[in-house]
Amino acid sequence: MVPEIDQQRFAEAQAAGALVVDVRNGGEYRAGHVPGARSAPLPNLPLVLSELPKDRPVYVICQSGGRSAQATSLLRGLGYDAHSVSGGTAAWIDAGRPAVSGDEPGTPTAPATSEETR
C-alpha cells in the first residue's frame, strides 16, 4: 500500500516548505501546479533521483493520484520517505488553493481554476 497524505495535511506541509515533486507531463505542469512544486515527469523521475533527499519527506503529486502513486511506490522502494498526495493537483485547485503556471516552481499570483489546468 502506497502511503497517501490528504489535502489538508498536504496544504500544511506545503505551507511549511515541504519538498513537492509533480510527476505530470510538462504541459500539465506549465498549465498550473502547486506553488513550489518541482517538475519531474514520471518517465524522467529516475533522472532526478540523485537530487532528491532521503532524509526528509517527499510529497509526490500528479493530476488525480494515479501517477503519483506509481512514483511514490518507486521512491519508497529506493529508500525515500515518499507520500502520494490524495486527489492530486485537481483536488488542490478544486479546493480553491493557489496554483502557478509556467516552467518554474514559482509563487502564486492568483488561484487557477480546475478548467485552466485540464
Image: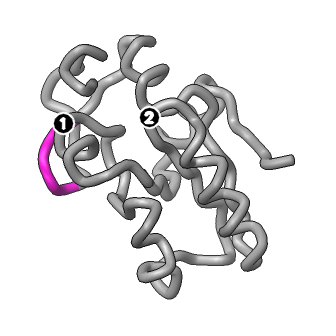
Q: Residue at x 43, y 82 (%)?
A: 47
Please give left or right for residue 63 compared with residue 107 in the image: right
Estimate how packed mark 1 is, as few (under 14), some (14 to 19) or many (20 or more) residues with alpha carbons within 10 Å.
some
Please give left or right for residue 116 compared with residue 16 in the image: left
Instruction: Indicate the position of residue 91 as horizontal and vertical percent values.
Output: 48, 20
Instruction: Looking at this view, name the residue that lies furthest to the bottom.
Output: 50
Q: Secondary structure at mark 1?
A: helix
Estimate how packed mark 2 is, as few (under 14), some (14 to 19) or many (20 or more) residues with alpha carbons within 10 Å.
many
81 or 88, nearer to the observer: 88
Check residue 108 for magenta coloring.
no
Q: Amino acid at mark 2?
A: Gln
Q: Secondary structure at mark 2?
A: loop
Q: CA distance from mark 1 to mark 2?
A: 11 Å
Residue at mark 1: 31
Instruction: Indicate the position of residue 95 as horizontal and vertical percent values.
Output: 44, 12
Instruction: Indicate the position of residue 34 as horizontal and vertical percent values.
Output: 35, 38
Q: Could you tell me what secondary structure mostly forms the magenta stretch?
A: loop
Q: Residue at x 68, y 50 (%)?
A: 83
Q: Amino acid at mark 1?
A: Ala
Q: Residue at x 52, y 76 (%)?
A: 52
Above or below for 78 versus 10: below
In what quadrant of the picture does the C terminus appear?
A: top left
Above or below for 59 versus 57: above
Magenta-tinted stretch: 100-104
26 or 13, nearer to the observer: 26
Give the number of the disc on residue 63.
2
Asked which quadrant contains residue 110, the reply is: top left
Task: Specify which label sits upstream in the sequence, 1 or 2.
Answer: 1
Label 1–label 2 contact, CB within 8 A? no
